[in-house]
Amino acid sequence: MPDVLVRPSRRLLSLFANYLHWYVGRHFHAIRVANAGRFPSVRGPLIAYSNHASWWDPLALILFSRYFLPTSDHYAPMDATALKHYGFLSKLGLFPIEPGTRRGAMQFLRAAEEVMSRPDSVLWVTPEGRFTDMRTRPVVFRPGLAALVARLGACTLVPMAAEYTFWDERLPEILICCGQPIMVNNGRQHSTEEWNERLCAALTATQDELAALAQLRDPANFETILSGRVGISGVYEGWKRLLALLTGRDYQASHGSIPRQ
């Protein structure tokens, strides 16, 4: 474990984010964010923690972070073995830990405290530590995040929920919901167990909120930060274009644009 975190490379991160705009846009209809106004724009110590619904989580959250805090440095823990295999990720703000071990817990705490000491830096954590369906209850965290907060002074935490769901289009939506920020004046005033209970409850409430919004299937409840592909594709898509040309109508690729009776 290095004594000093590698500061994210702005140039490499910009190139990678541009790639992600194309890559995620090929596989999803949109990334939409509910309650975006809750996400702090403050420069103080900030921790964003979320459920771990999918392999896509880090890619979606990189795009989220670039949209809402483009000038901040963003950091997140990653399995040391995997990070060694994908070495370039260390230049994007990921730092190595050995999950499930005492050594790994200390690696996380040391690195996270250093992140919190750096101006204009954000720590991203998925404290469940494994892929979990967003509607699984109760929400269960590994103790690392709560142990960190119990060692800190002032900081802000934001619970965030993510879900991947199909609405009216061929491709799925990425839905993200920002929960109510938790303002911490002195984390040492509460135990790790107390913090764990509070943080789990906050994420549960945020997931419940996102589940209710997802069922409404209304983009107006979200801010769209990335628009991907629309339409059916293939032969059917070509037939729609031809009909639009022959009838003089505007071509609408989106299936959601079809009037409902």
Image (spheres, rainbow, N blue to C red):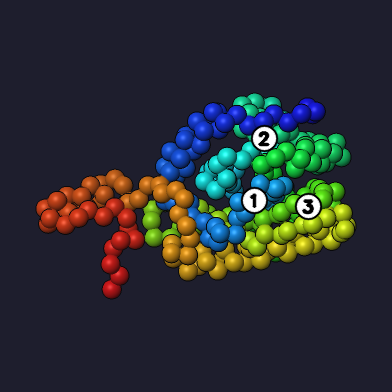
Asked if residue 147 shows in the view, the reply is no
Q: Residues within 10 Å of mark 2 (few under 14, many from 20)?
A: many
Sequence-wise first label, 1 or 2: 1
For residue 243, what is the image quadrant?
bottom left
Sequence-wise first label, 1 or 3: 1
Q: Residue at x 26, y 51 (%)?
A: 236
Residues tagged 2 and 3 counted as in contact (Cβ below 8 A): no
Secondary structure state at the residue bearing disc 2: strand
The quarter of the image holding the N terminus is top right
Q: What amino acid is found at the position of numbered circle 1 in the picture?
A: Val
Question: Label 2 vs label 3: CA separation?
Answer: 23 Å
Which residue has dot 1 on it? Answer: 42
Question: Label 1 vs label 3: CA separation?
Answer: 13 Å
How many marks on residues? 3
Residue 53: percent from left, percent from top: 61, 52
Front of the two marks 2 and 3 = 3
